[in-house]
């Protein structure tokens, strides 16, 4: 029994260790919400800045 | 703005993704990212090379304003119902032009404060807080690697005060390394980001009260996977932002949420191929969803995207009206937030003779015959807002 517990603890620690070593964003456990690309630009490129909603569902930038 | 082969373009974008160019800027012109929509409905922005402020509307009507001094244009970020717009000017070409200015709708600029060497180079996008004062950040030293920085307060009557200084930018989370901006949550609680500060050089999120109390609520562990940029206060009362990843080092941009009490979580990690590199600003639309634009994704030149977390739709609110009294038949400007899509306006229960949305902050309405002194209400698809004070009928 003790051996099983020790093996289980070792497994958990290994998994935790691997998770801790995994590079990535802070406190990330998978994507939340739905993100949808609504336009892939075909010319120019996106210059990130605030969009201004000028009518419901209609933005300018 | 969209950038192209030498030409920047202003555009419109629908929530379904239909993008239309409405104006092409002169070849080699650069456009500052920040724009504001003023009480006249025009969007005001700043262009360099040549240096000019401009205004435009969504039909493409465009006006340039010649810079008032030193050939430097203010980067605008705050607009008020009286028609004034506020912003800062920065060092250009090694020449110090550090000011906080007020600009009217015709482009006339008044300097409210000139920053000394000790007061630094103001970062764009100061905010107007609920106490009626302006707050912003400035950096001392190279603006991309500030050796120290500060948060300032400027009153409408031009009283300038340093709220907080950061003597060592690297150790003390100095702002002033990216286009950070402050956000007010509740009354007097300012939140901001410091892009490359902290022991990990990964950036941090800090809280600063308008009385000067300061604490770091989150420190980013690895700048490769994102340094924090600008945050947005959303309808659930939490702050959302973008951490800009370092693609060349294998990092990705990501979207995060931090509560005012400091609980931090990365909620979405971008794929570079589909979405791209993102120093984005999250705009929460009237449908409650976030909209943004990024670089390099899609076929390689960037994407527009919408992120739905199921957040509440923004409720309308009314703060006041100009003028504060009139007789029937007069046109009144109502101001507040989230007023887009107004479906009705009433003066003490009597429907306005006519009304129109100017912006998300303004509705223009005609006082109806038979109206009496009392509160004004504006109804949008998301709810009804009532003015905090009564409108007086003569």
Image: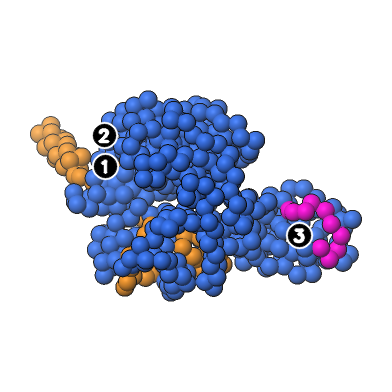
Chain colours: A orange, B blue
Is B363 placed above or below B149 here?
A: below
Q: Which chain carries label 2?
A: B
Query: Residue at coordinates 22% horizontally, 53% vertically from top-left?
Result: B247
> Label 3 is found on which chain of the structure?
B
Relative to B301, residue B335 above or below: above
Question: Of the residues tagged 2 and 3, which is closer to the observer?
Answer: 3
Please give the name of the residue rendered at 82% of the width and 58% of the height, measured from the top-left corner: B348
Q: Name the residue under label 3.
A: B332
Which stretch is magenta? B321-330
Disc 2 and disc 3 in contact, CB within 8 angstroms: no
Q: Name the residue under label 2.
A: B200
Question: Which corner quadrant of the image does residue B146 belong to?
Answer: top left
- Label 2 and label 1 in one chain: yes
Q: If the image is split into quadrants, where does the C terminus of chain B sit?
A: bottom right
Disc 2 to disc 1, C-alpha distance: 8 Å
**Residue B70 appears in view:** yes
């Amino acid at each position: 029994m003790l051996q099983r517990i020790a093996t289980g603890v070792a497994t958990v620690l290994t998994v935790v260790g691997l998770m801790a070593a995994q590079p990535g964003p802070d406190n990330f456990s998978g994507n939340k919400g739905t993100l949808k690309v609504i336009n892939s630009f075909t010319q120019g490129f996106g210059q990130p800045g605030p969009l201004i909603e000028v009518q419901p569902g209609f933005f300018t930038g | 703005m969209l950038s192209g082969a030498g030409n920047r373009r202003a555009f419109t974008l629908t929530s379904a993704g239909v993008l239309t160019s409405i104006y092409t800027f002169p070849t080699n012109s650069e456009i500052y990212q920040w724009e504001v929509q003023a009480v006249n409905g025009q969007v005001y922005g700043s262009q360099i090379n040549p240096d000019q402020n401009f205004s435009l509307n969504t039909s493409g009507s465009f006006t340039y304003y010649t810079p008032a001094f030193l050939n430097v244009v203010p980067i605008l970020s705050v607009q008020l119902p009286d028609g004034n717009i506020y912003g800062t000017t920065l060092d250009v070409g090694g020449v110090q032009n550090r000011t906080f200015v007020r600009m009217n709708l015709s482009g006339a600029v008044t300097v409210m404060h000139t920053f000394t060497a000790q007061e630094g180079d103001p970062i764009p996008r100061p905010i107007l807080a609920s106490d009626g004062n302006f707050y912003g950040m400035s950096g001392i030293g190279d603006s991309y690697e500030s050796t120290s920085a500060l948060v300032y307060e400027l009153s409408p009557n031009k009283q300038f005060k340093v709220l907080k200084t950061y003597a060592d930018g690297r150790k003390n989370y100095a702002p002033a390394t990216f286009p950070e901006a402050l956000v007010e949550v509740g009354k007097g609680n300012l939140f901001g980001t410091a892009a490359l500060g902290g022991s990990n050089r990964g950036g941090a999120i800090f809280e600063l009260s308008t009385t000067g109390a300061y604490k770091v609520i989150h420190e980013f562990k690895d700048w490769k996977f994102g340094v924090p940029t600008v945050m947005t206060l959303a309808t659930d009362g939490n702050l959302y932002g973008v951490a800009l990843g370092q693609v060349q080092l294998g990092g990705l941009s990501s979207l995060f949420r931090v509560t005012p009490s400091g609980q931090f979580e990365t909620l979405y990690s971008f794929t570079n191929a589909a979405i791209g590199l993102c120093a984005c600003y999250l705009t929460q639309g009237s449908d409650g969803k976030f909209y943004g634009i990024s670089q390099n994704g899609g076929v390689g030149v960037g994407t527009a995207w919408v992120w739905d977390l199921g957040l509440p739709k923004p409720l309308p609110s009314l703060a006041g009206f100009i003028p504060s009294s009139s007789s029937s038949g007069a046109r009144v400007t109502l101001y507040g937030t989230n007023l887009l899509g107004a479906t009705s306006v009433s003066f003490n229960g009597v429907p306005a003779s006519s009304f129109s949305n100017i912006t998300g902050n303004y509705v223009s309405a005609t006082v109806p015959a038979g109206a009496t002194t009392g509160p004004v209400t504006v109804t949008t698809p998301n709810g009804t807002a009532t003015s905090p004070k009564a409108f007086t009928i003569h």
